[in-house]
Image: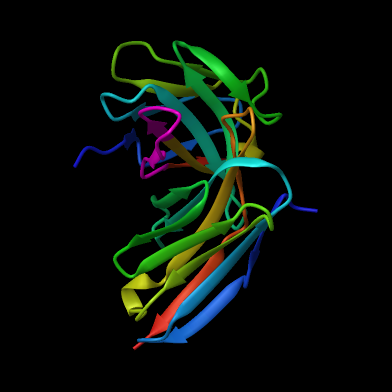
């Protein structure tokens, strides 16, 4: 069983829709990261969080430590949001990131 | 805005050859990482480096791999004798401190033939 599970694996949306991507993990963590991987392969860090909620523009990330669950929300989605979104966790007493398999998002005009 | 850079963007090599992948982390960052992503698979941690030594490594990071920070700016990953299964995208990352997020480089695509 993977230590980090994401759902859905694939997601299509119409421009303007509200998007939610979920991440569940099975280990105790010190931080959770949301990353965006573009079609060319580059990875951009969106959020690092260890509790509560963070917002940046149209992106919102939440985490529930007790339930070992995080969500990434995109409001008013746009075709340029099309990418793979990856959840990664850093477990306690380690510096290594454990990655989920990613959620491929396509937003159509 | 400062960014992590990697060279080359694409490297093709023959099986058994040595390759060195280069990274220039952000200048005031202290923690450095290498990850790899085999085509169609998830990103995997290889190694972390802090204070001029390896702080953690994965099972993938065997004796064929080594890392070095030869000067104040570069951070390299060497694969001594490449195998077909080393073909992947290799990402370098760095961060300022334990409390901050990691910044990823654009990756080097390694193709072993």
Q: Does residue B63 appear to the left or right of B111 in the view shown?
A: right
Q: Does residue B108 appear to the left or right of A7 in the view shown?
A: left
Q: Does residue A78 appear to the left or right of A12 in the view shown?
A: left
Above or below for B102 versus B70? below
Q: Where residue A86 appears, x then y in whole percent?
A: 53, 57
Above or below for B16 versus A98? above
Q: Looking at this view, is A87 or A66 the one in front?
A: A66
Q: Where residue A14 appears, x then y in whole percent?
A: 41, 89
State the quadrant of the C terminus of chain A: bottom left
Which residue is situated farthest in the right direction here?
A1
Where residue A102 sits, quadrant-wise, is bottom right
Which residue is situated farthest in the left direction here?
B1
Q: Is residue B95 magenta?
A: yes
Q: Looking at this view, is A3 or B79 the one in front?
A: A3
Above or below for B7 versus A46? above
Q: Where residue B103 appears, x then y in whole percent?
A: 37, 40
Where residue B70 sits, quadrant-wise, is top left
What colouring does the structure picture have?
rainbow
Where residue B59 sits, quadrant-wise, is top right
Q: Where residue A90 appears, x then y in whole percent?
A: 59, 39
> How would you classify the magenta stretch by its main secondary structure?
loop
Q: Does residue A49 appear to the left or right of B4 in the view shown?
A: right
Q: Is residue A103 magenta?
A: no
What residue is drawn where x is 28% and y is 30%?
A: B26
Above or below for A29 versus A101? above
Q: Which residues are magenta?
A: B93-107
Q: Looking at this view, is B39 or B92 the one in front?
A: B92
């Amino acid at each position: 069983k993977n230590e980090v599970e994401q759902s859905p694996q694939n997601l299509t949306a119409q421009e303007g829709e509200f998007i939610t991507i979920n991440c569940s993990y099975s280990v105790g963590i010190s931080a959770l990261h949301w990353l965006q991987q573009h079609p060319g392969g580059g990875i951009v860090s969106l959020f690092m969080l260890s509790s509560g909620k963070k917002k940046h523009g149209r992106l919102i990330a939440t985490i529930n430590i007790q339930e070992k669950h995080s969500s990434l929300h995109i409001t008013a989605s746009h075709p340029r949001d099309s990418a793979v979104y990856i959840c990664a966790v850093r477990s306690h007493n380690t510096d290594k990131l454990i990655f989920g398999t990613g959620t491929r998002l396509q937003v159509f005009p | 805005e400062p960014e992590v850079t990697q060279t080359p963007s694409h490297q093709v090599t023959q099986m058994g050859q040595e390759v060195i992948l280069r990274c220039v982390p952000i200048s005031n960052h202290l923690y450095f990482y290498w990850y790899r992503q085999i085509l169609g698979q998830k990103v995997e941690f290889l190694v972390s480096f802090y204070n001029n030594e390896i702080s953690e490594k994965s099972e993938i990071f065997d004796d064929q791999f080594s890392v070095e920070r030869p000067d104040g700016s570069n951070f390299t990953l060497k694969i001594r004798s490449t195998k077909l299964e080393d073909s992947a995208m290799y990402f370098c990352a760095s961060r300022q401190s334990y409390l901050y997020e990691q910044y990823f480089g654009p990756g080097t695509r390694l193709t072993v033939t």
